Image: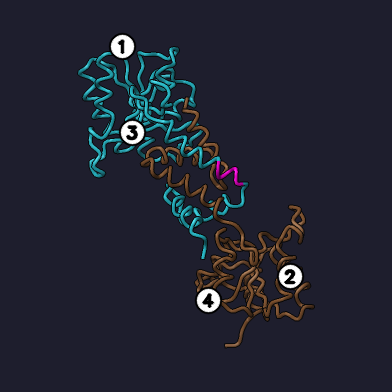
Chain colours: A cyan, B brown
Amino acid sequence: MTPDALNRLVAQLAKLPGIGEKTAQRLAFHVLRAPAEYARGLSAALLDVVDHVSLCPKCFSLCDKAHPQCGFCSDTRRDDKLLCVVEGIADELALERTREFKGRYHVLHGVLSPLEGVGPDQLRIRELLTRLQDTDVEEVILATNPDVEGEATALYLTRLLKPMGIKVTRLAQGIPMGGDLEFADQATLARALSARRDI
Amino acid sequence: MTPDALNRLVAQLAKLPGIGEKTAQRLAFHVLRAPAEYARGLSAALLDVVDHVSLCPKCFSLCDKAHPQCGFCSDTRRDDKLLCVVEGIADELALERTREFKGRYHVLHGVLSPLEGVGPDQLRIRELLTRLQDTDVEEVILATNPDVEGEATALYLTRLLKPMGIKVTRLAQGIPMGGDLEFADQATLARALSARRDI
C-alpha cells in the first residue's frame, strides 16, 4: 500500500549494518518529512564518496582519488621510523584521536580468520612486507584488536617481521583507565598482573 | 585526515534520527566497502522518494505523485463507512499489518501539543472535517496513541465529531496480548479492570 519509491528506499536502507526493516522505515519517513534538500544532499554525498574516495596505494587508508597519497602518507611531519599496523580505518581514526601517535599507518583491512576464509592473501600483508623492504621503519606497532583473530594476526606478522630485523611491538593490555578491578574480567586482570610495571 | 567526501557523507548520515557521529561513520565505511552499485542505488532511491512520493490529497497517506489518490483511497473493496484517524503513517501501516481493518484512513501528521506549538491548524483536522461533510462515514475510530497528547487529540476530535452525528470510537486499552499482570503498569491495569468485558 506504500508507494514503490518508498519501498525501494526502505529496502536500500535496510541493507545498512544494524538497520532493520522497522528502523529503515523510520529513517525513510524522516527523509520524506525533511526538506527535499536533505535527501538531495545525502544522495549527492553517497555518489561523491564512491566517486572520490579510494584507498591510498601505500598505506591503504582512505584517500581522495585526486591525490596520489592519503593525508597520513603525505604529511611530512610524521615519523617515518614508526609504523602502526591496524585492522581497519576505524581503528586508525581511534588511534589518531589520541593525538599521541605521530608515525605512519598500514591498514590490513581485516584479520586472519580461517573460519571466515580470510587468509594472508585477503589482507594487505604482502603490501606491508614490500613497503618495509625499502623504507627506514625501525619499529612496527601491531595494533590489531586483543581478541582471538587479532592476536593470531599479530603473531603471524611477528613471525614475518622479526627475521627482517625490525623491532615489533604490541599495544599494552591491562585495566582500562577509569576501570574497576572488581568488574575487570579474569583474562584482563591476569594480563594486567603479569605485565605489571615498576613505578 | 579523512577525505572531504567521506566527512560530508558522515555529516549527512548523522542528521538521521537515532544516528550519532560514530554510527554515521560506521555506515559510511560500510558504503565504501560495499560495491559502488549499493551507494548508487541508495542515492537514486533517495532522489526517487522526494521526486515521486507525496501526500494523498484526500487522506494524507503517502501517495505516488503519478496517481491522483493513494492505494487506500483508490481501493474499491474498502469500507467507506468506517474511517480510522491516526497520528502518522507508521501507525497506519501498523494497523494495516493486522489485516483486521478494511475501512479508510485519515492521517493527522501529528498530535495536539501546546508545549511544542502544535495546534489544530498544524494537523489535518480541517481536511478531516471537510471530508466528513460529503461522505457516508458512519463511524470514526480515533486511533491516536494512548498517551497525554494522543488522548487530548482524541478528546478534541470527539467534541468536533459528535455534534455531526457520527459514531466516534477509540481503540481498546488494556493488557497487551502475551502480557503479564505482574508487570503491567498501574494505569494500564486500572484501565483493563474498569473496561472489563463479559465472557
Q: Mark 4 points at which residue?
A: B100
Left/right of residue B95 with respect to residue A122 in the rendered view = right
Residue B50 rendering spot, x and y as whole percentages: 56, 50
Looking at the image, can residue A78 be seen? yes
Secondary element at image label 3: loop
Gap between marks 1 and 4 measured at Cα: 73 Å
Q: Could you tell me if the residues under marks 2 and 4 are in contact, i.e. CB atoms within 8 Å?
A: no
Q: Name the residue under label 2.
A: B130
Residue span colored magenta: A36-40
Residue A109 numbered tag: 3
- Amino acid bearing label 4: Glu
Name the kind of residue labelled 1 in the image.
Asp
Nearer the viewer's eye, disc 4 or disc 3? 4
Of circles 1 and 4, the one toward us is 4
User: Do the CB atoms of the residues marked 4 and 3 lie less than 8 Å apart?
Assistant: no
User: Which quarter shows the C terminus of chain B?
Assistant: bottom right
Residue A134, position as x, y percentages in the image = 26, 13
Query: Residue A150 placed where, x, y %?
Result: 31, 34
Residue name at image x 37 percent, y 38 percent: B33
Q: Which chain carries label 2?
A: B
Q: Quadrant of residue B60?
A: bottom right
Residue at the (39%, 40%) spot, across then down? A185
